[in-house]
Amino acid sequence: MKKRMILAGICLLAATALTAQNKVKGTYGYLYCHMSDRGEFTAYAVSRDGMNYQDILNGDAIMDPEEHARIEGGQRDAFITRSWDGKGYVMVTTDMCVRKSHKWDNYGIDLLKSDDLIHWTSVTFDYRKGKQIFSNPEAESVYKNWSTINRVWAPQIFWDPNYVWENGEKGGYMIYYSMLNRPEEKYDRMYYSYADKTFTKLTQPRLLFDWGYATIDADINLLSDGLYHMLIKKEGGKPGIYTATSKQLTSGWGEPVEDDYVSFEGRKNCEGSSAFQLIGDKTWRVAYIQYSDNPKHYRICKADEHLRGFHDPVDIKGVSAPQHGSFMRLTKKEYKRLLKWDQEHRNKVTK
């Protein structure tokens, strides 16, 4: 009996240690929240089946990027998910405007939150200002000189209920992204910070892993095997979109599986992967931008329930200018709200 109780306790601890996961809710449809390929702003499209979409607001900006991207006035790589309590929504974007700067450098990210998917508030973090912008400026810093930072790219969100703040409060949003500071490192590496429940505070970055070559555009999901699975673009070694796994969210990320990656696009360059499951389906869909084509193709392929065996890529349908983005399930109420907003917008335009 005593042995069984100890074993049960161990199993319980193992289960509770793997509770980090973004909240999934809704069985009516899907939201595709993405950077528009027509400009550096965030756009929406909705779908009932996860493959065939329709633009919201004609694919125009759902918010003013100049208002929310306070560094460069451009929003790229939008990632959206539900807030930790399921009562709202949070989003992160790369604060970057290549159209204005004419260079592939940027200096920070934007954290946004909403109660209705339509109205958003935000805070901007300009990393050039140094560790004073973070909630723990006294902590050891990953850089000696923040003013020389060159990139803060493609942030994403993962809710971690096990994170403990200095005041003892539990729960935080792990924000993971790539950074490059050319005077201090040779290539883009993956880092992570934690944002608080108000989505306004951010901790100093910590290195997530370093495989010895450039990596960007990570996408993390917790699978039924109890492991965290990461899709990530390798820009060093043999380029492509690969997968890696870990038992812990912020450590233990072994190098990617070399024989199972998005390889069927041949020599075409792909990035910005985003994995999601169709309602009632244990297998996965993996979306990504095939950016070396002209015009570009935004593709969705199939993968098995272990996020392996990528196959059958097709173009997304119904989106006028798809680019790097993310997917979230919707309830009927949310879906109808976005359609009503869209219709009101169309009526205003035609008057």
Image: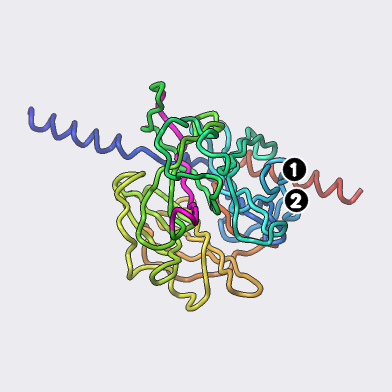
Per the image, label 1 sits on a secondary structure element best described as helix
Residue type pointed to by label 2: Leu
Q: Which residue is drawn at 45% across and 51% down?
A: 280
- Residue 287: x and y in percent read 52, 61
Q: Is residue 120 magenta?
A: no
Q: Name the residue under label 2.
A: 57
- Quarter of the image for residue 292 reads bottom right
Q: Is residue 181 left or right of residue 305?
A: right
Most extreme residue toward the bottom is 266
The span from disc 2 to disc 1 (Cα, nearest Å) is 8 Å
Tell me which secondary structure the magenta stretch mostly adopts.
strand
Q: In this view, does 164 lie to the left or right of 297?
A: left
Between 242 and 72, the residue placed more toward the observer is 72
Q: x, y (%) of residue 197? A: 50, 29
Residue 182 part of the magenta segment: yes
Earlier in the chain: of badge 2 and badge 1, it is: 2
Label 1 neighbour load within 10 Å: few <14, some 14-19, many 20+: some
Give 239 or 299, whichever is nearer the viewer. Answer: 239
Residue 299, numbered circle: none
Local secondary structure at mark 2: helix
Q: Is residue 102 left or right of residue 78?
A: right
Above or below: residue 165 compared with residue 297: above
Residue placed at 50% from the left, 45% from the top? 145
What label does residue 341 carry, if any?
1
Dividing the picture into quarters, in which one does residue 71 lie?
top right
Q: Give the range drawn in magenta.
A: 169-185
Across and down, in percent, residue 350 comes to 89, 51
Amino acid type of disc 1?
Trp
Depth check: 186 or 104 in front?
A: 186
